Image (spheres, rainbow, N blue to C red):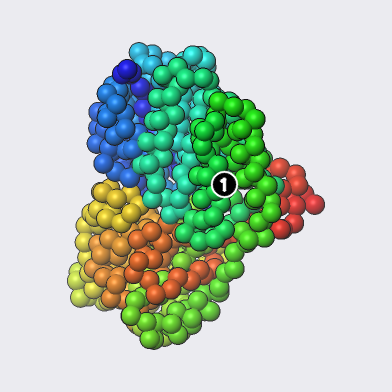
Amino acid sequence: MAFKILIAGFQHETNTFAPSPATYASFVRGEGHPPMMRGEAVLALRDVNLPIGGFIRASEQHGHTLMPVIWTAASPSAQVTEDAYERIAGEIVAAAAAGGFDAIYLDLHGAMVAQHVDDGEGELLARIRTKVGAAVPVVASLDLHANVTERMLASADALVAYRTYPHVDMADTGARAERLLARLLAGHKPLVKAARRLPFLIPINGMCTLLEPARSMYAELGTQEEDAVVSLSFAPGFPAADFPECGPVIWGYGEDAAAVRHAVDTLHDRMLRDESLWAVPFLSPDAAVAEAMRLSATAQKPVVIADTQDNPGAGADSNTTGMLRALLENGAQDAALGLIWDPEAAAQAHAVGLGATLELALGGRSGTPGDTPFVGTFKVVALSDGRCRYDGPMMHGMQVELGPVACLAIGGVRVAVSSTKAQMLDRNLYRVAGIEPEAMKILVNKSSVHFRADFEPIAHAVLVAKAPGPMTADPADLPWTRLTQGIRVRPMGKPFGA
């Protein structure tokens, strides 16, 4: 049987310690995501590796009629402004209030904090539930980094989260959400829910599902999801949102309450048993570069360094200079770094032209202690309009516009400079700056984990560096004030408030 389904997407991952808020203009631009789209234009996302793309394809295959409202996202940053939240959420809630549909699907992140609302998704879901009542099924997909709240769980009929980091299963997650919604619309036995919160925060670098212990944890998630247990999700959380419900949550749905509770408890007990395994070691900038130079001397592939504390995918501004200094001070050759977000530097490079040299104070505007602009003489070796398509596993097929882009060379280092902030998660973000990543000995990526999806196949080794930056890699280093009392601020770490 075919149904009418209202669909919308509103995504933001909020780092409350980050320097820059997400404004309405941020969502209009998309900042590394597709730009804001409304109505029938949303359906063009069917072929993009996004949750809403997977949901659209699955729904169309089943003959459902989709009523798209809006899809929008902005780069992770500090809080979403009240103006942006109310304008976008208001648009979705107004469409829900107008009726004319049988169910609602939302493509959400799960870690949105607005200037006036701690729980952005919980607030949105609650407002929608108030408008449509209890009889209309509401299902949402969430990012693996969601900080899942009681209000979110109470307001939605079902929530389903990604199972990969890097997030290569976003469209698959949308399709899983469609299957849950179809089950509800078909009149199956109502789903019962169970959820458990974990008592420690996890560094985002430790959540990579290509590595242990996350790989085995998510494998067990799949084995527990069978028979009476219809759906299980584990969100390790986004450990940079200073509010009481920040942290990891395991939850599930099924027709048998005892079976669902048993599955969730089994996964919860596994996490407690393996807590120490979720800790992450980090290298200093100099140590990372020295090790990369040693390895690359005989390697046939580049050594990749994650500049994790300047990851714009976690709220940083992608313009710190600690790793650039380390590369130059250690004499690294055939090295590339990207992306540095510095619109002024890109504009100056385009003004002087290809082959010219210019004096620049590049980046270094994060406000983080130890980070200052890098002053030097650079040569302009490539220029572009910043338009490219992602061909890697994450967001495959998505078109992005970075604005004017320049490749600036200094010493043995090439720096990809962009006019729009974007995480280095696809090799084409180097190519749009005239850099062939496979030809370099060392690549320094402003990313934490997402880059692994497209870069590990070409990497001799991957190192993680902790240069000064606003996205604190170890949650124990953050100045928390509002966490739940007693939660450990890192695996096996000190309890908050102790």
Judge by depth and name the residue closer to the eye, 70 or 247: 247
The type of residue carrying mark 1 is Gly
Q: Is residue 169 above or below residue 382?
A: above
Q: Which element type, helix, strand or loop, lies under badge 1?
A: loop
Give the x, y percent position of residue 246. Answer: 62, 43
Residue in the picture at 75% in, 44% down = 485
Left-right relation of 329 to 59: right
- Of all residues shown, which one is farthest toward the right? 498
Q: Is residue 396 above or below residue 341?
A: above
Q: Quadrant of the N terminus?
A: top left
Give the x, y percent position of residue 125. Answer: 51, 26
Judge by depth and name the residue closer to the eye, 470 or 427: 427
- The residue that disc 1 covers is 237
- What count of labels does the image hold? 1
Residue 16 in view here: no
Residue in the picture at 72% in, 58% down = 493
Residue in the picture at 27% in, 28% down = 60
Judge by depth and name the residue closer to the eye, 267 or 168: 267
Give the x, y percent position of residue 180. Answer: 44, 29
Q: Is residue 400 above or below residue 206?
A: above
